[in-house]
Image (cartoon, rainbow, N blue to C red):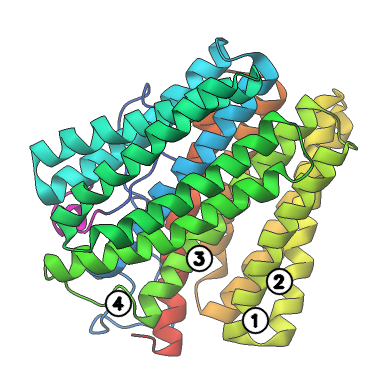
Amino acid sequence: MKAANAAVKAAAGLAVLAISVTACGGSSSGGSKTAQEQHSMSAAPTSTTTSTTTDATATAAATLRAGLDQLFREHVNLTGFTVQTAVATGIGSANTAASLKALDANTVALGDAVGSVYGAAARKAFIKMWRAHIGFFVEYTKGLATNDKQMVSDAQAKLANYKQDFSKFLGRATKIPSSAIATELQGHIQTLEAAIQSIVAKKADAAAKLQMAAEHMDGTAAALAGGIAKEKSLAGNPAGDASSLRAALTGLFIQHVAQVGAVVQTAVATSLTSPQTSGAISALDKNTVDLGDAIGSVYGTDARTAFLKMWRAHIGFFVNYTKGLATNDQKLVASAQAKLANYKKDFADFLGTATGLPATAVAQDLQGHITTLEAAIQAIVSKSPTAADKISMAESHMAGTAAVLAKAIAAQKKLS
């Protein structure tokens, strides 16, 4: 799939009702596509499914959960990207403004999704409150950056009020107790505040804290999906094995891209060998291990070992690609791209053998991952204002990959 250079929008029909996530990019480019639309593997036949097989990963409830997982994770990751951009270039810079615009595209996408289920008034109310809480995080960041403790305190008070108001709003809509939603929102506030603190202070644990904040949103997505699916009588089980598989792969693949972006962004702001970059690389490897554990839980220890070896290798090739761009070493860039091309073939064979998907289709999809992530790295290294848009596009590509892999694995393992 060629990533859609467009904003996230709610998809049509039942997928809209399910708050289906769609390919996310910059709000300035137009022409959206769904996360699986023209996705290279989405139309590929598999040896494990038939036309009469029910795809438990694509029910309205499963699509709802995966969609919320993507949008909520992207909210956290884009917030972190924006804060890092502001620290490196200034709160009033063109790069920060562009990052805020990409973050707002995610807000509109979430609002469109909510509106597709609960109507125009709910959409408007959601966007107003969601934008407000982002503004409070911006205020919190400014306070930390300028050592203005009163501004920090005011922002935290506003976030506390938002938590109460927003939990009531969601509680009325989903029938989930507002107290339970408030608890989830408090977790979001605390983990994202911790991440912002580390980013502003330029600590080595900044990427790890941001990853923790993104991971927190998995539980939020699962809880809201359960409530909405029940309240709207959506088909499927949002807590079933197939739905959980798709949601897990969606979150892990999106986070892979986000953590690569954090490594590159940190390296550009500091150096390739700084403690902050080392910390970001460690956080990225945690995501790698989590992915390996997921593969191993399905296909066994040998598959886990093989996955980790190849996945870590391809990250190393992206690191070399980044070094080449940063030092204007065209030979290193070309070498890294050649190694990524070889990885693409080897990893496609590995996944194809495991899942039953055609290796050629897997390779084509991996090329989409390589192409979109290379574009994001180029934008970050060159300090382009398009960087946030590009990393968002690369993340969104992986949502389609997760959906297709989950479908193949669920059919193969007879998950429901």
- State how far apart marks 3 and 1 are (Cα): 13 Å
Q: Of callouts 3 and 2, which one flags the residue occurring earlier in the amino acid sequence?
A: 3
- State how far apart marks 4 and 3 are (Cα): 16 Å
Marker disc for residue 55: 4
State whether residue 364 appears in this view.
Answer: no
Q: Check disc 1 and report the residue beneath it.
A: 296
Whether residue 209 is situated above or below residue 276 in the rendered picture: below
Mark whose residue sits in front, 4 or 3: 3
Q: Of callouts 3 and 1, which one flags the residue occurring earlier in the amino acid sequence?
A: 3
Mark whose residue sits in front, 4 or 1: 1
Marker disc for residue 307: 2
Mark whose residue sits in front, 2 or 1: 1
- State how far apart marks 2 and 4 are (Cα): 25 Å
| Left or right: 313 in relation to 152 | right
Q: Secondary structure at mark 1?
A: helix
Q: Residue at x 78, y 35 (%)?
A: 322
Q: Check disc 3 and report the residue beneath it.
A: 249
Q: Residue at x 57, y 16 (%)?
A: 95
Start-end of magenta stretch: 10-19
Determine whether label 2 and label 1 are within 8 Å by CB: yes
| Left or right: 188 in relation to 359 | left
